[in-house]
Amino acid sequence: SVPLAFFSGIGAGSKKGILFKGGIAIEGLKNVKAIVMDKTGTITKGNFVVQKANPAGNAMTANDLLAISASCELSSTHPIGNSIVDAAKEKGLSIERPSKVEEIAGHGIRAELSKGVVLCGNRKLMDEQNVDLSSYQKEDFGTEVLVVLNGKFVGNIVISDTVKEDAKEAIAAVKKQGIITAMLTGDAQESADAVAKETGIDEAHAKLLPQDKLSELKKIRESHGAVMFVGDGINDAPVLAGADVGAAMGSGADAAIEAADVVFMNSEMKAIPEAVSIAKMTNSISW
Ligand code: ADP
Ligand code: MG
């Protein structure tokens, strides 16, 4: 049974779109010393938009680069892949359905097209495949997708996502509550640092594979104490289950929502400090 005091907390939460799945979530939240968040879809909106396609040298035009990338990403379920397909469609470019596709978790995607084998992914993927990146010119903003055709680097696509409007204010409120903030992401260190700087998050841990996120969370727990993890993706489910308190954004994947102890129905960052205040107040009420 749920102790009587918790009902007031559950009620206060529901008025703010915060769904506590029981008293344990409220009790756990009271003692949280660190709040660890996923980046994409949690701190940022997860609405990726292609900013530009930079072909390397004069191997191909920007449109050709976008078209082969879109063909490679055609079946991808990743928001980055979807944004590339959308940009190519908007430009009316012809997209080819690959004969074979393989998603490489946390890295990118590989597809077989009539022109040959295309790889779209991050720097980590290219380094692991020993791709010669001497003609690659790094952009100083956004998330980048590097594109390789038949083993040769052919260009990069710059994509931007935006931080949620209430992120900075929410992080400031959490810090006022005496809680450490950290971000875990599979994205590049540069994108992670830019988001951390914009929002005031204390620590940015980047280039993490789904399984690395849980070990990083455990390290944070060892140095700071009880942790709440806030995430939204399928990949986040094990981390949500492994945290002292797991919280999912309402806009997230079903697996994340199921694994969570708390759900922020409106997917707003400000729900994080609100949930902490409700938990602290709830436990101080004596019956
Ligand atoms: P996150 O949700 O933190 O971005 P993911 O594990 O989903 O973590 O992805 C990690 C990184 O892998 C992405 O930031 C991107 O660089 C790369 N990546 C994943 N899937 C794709 C894809 N389909 N196309 C290009 N890059 C991808
Ligand atoms: Mg995510």
Image (cartoon, helix red, strand yellow):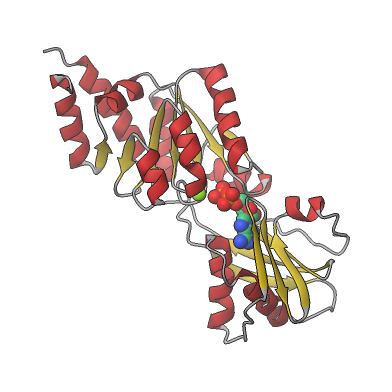
In the displayed structure image, the side of residue 244 where residue 151 appears, left or right: right
- Asked whether residue 205 appears in the rendered view, the answer is yes
State whether residue 115 is above or below residue 164: below
> Could one spot residue 269 in this view of the protein?
no
Q: Nearer the viewer, residue 198 or 45?
A: 45
User: Residue 198: x and y, percent?
Assistant: 53, 45
Residue at (18% x, 41% y) in the render: 15
Name the image quarter holding the C terminus: top left
The tally of labels here is 0
Q: Quadrant of the N terminus?
A: top left
In the figure, residue 274 lies in which quadrant? top left
203 up-or-down from 168: above or below: above
Q: Position of residue 277 (x, y in %)?
A: 28, 27
- In the picture, measured across the screen, residue 221 lies left or right of residue 60, that is left
Q: Nearer the viewer, residue 132 or 270?
A: 132
Q: Residue furthest top?
A: 286
Residue sticking out furthest to the front: 99
User: Where is residue 91, by image quadrant?
Assistant: bottom right
How far from the left and from the top, in percent, is residue 86?
53, 75
| Residue drawn at (77%, 71%) of the image | 117
Name the residue located 34 percent from the left edge and 22 percent from the top edge. Answer: 28
Is 68 rendered above or below residue 193? below
Q: Is residue 162 above or below residue 241?
A: below
Dividing the image into four quarters, tell me where ligand 1 lies: bottom right
Residue 252: image x %, image y %?
40, 51
Q: Residue at x 17, y 19 (%)?
A: 3
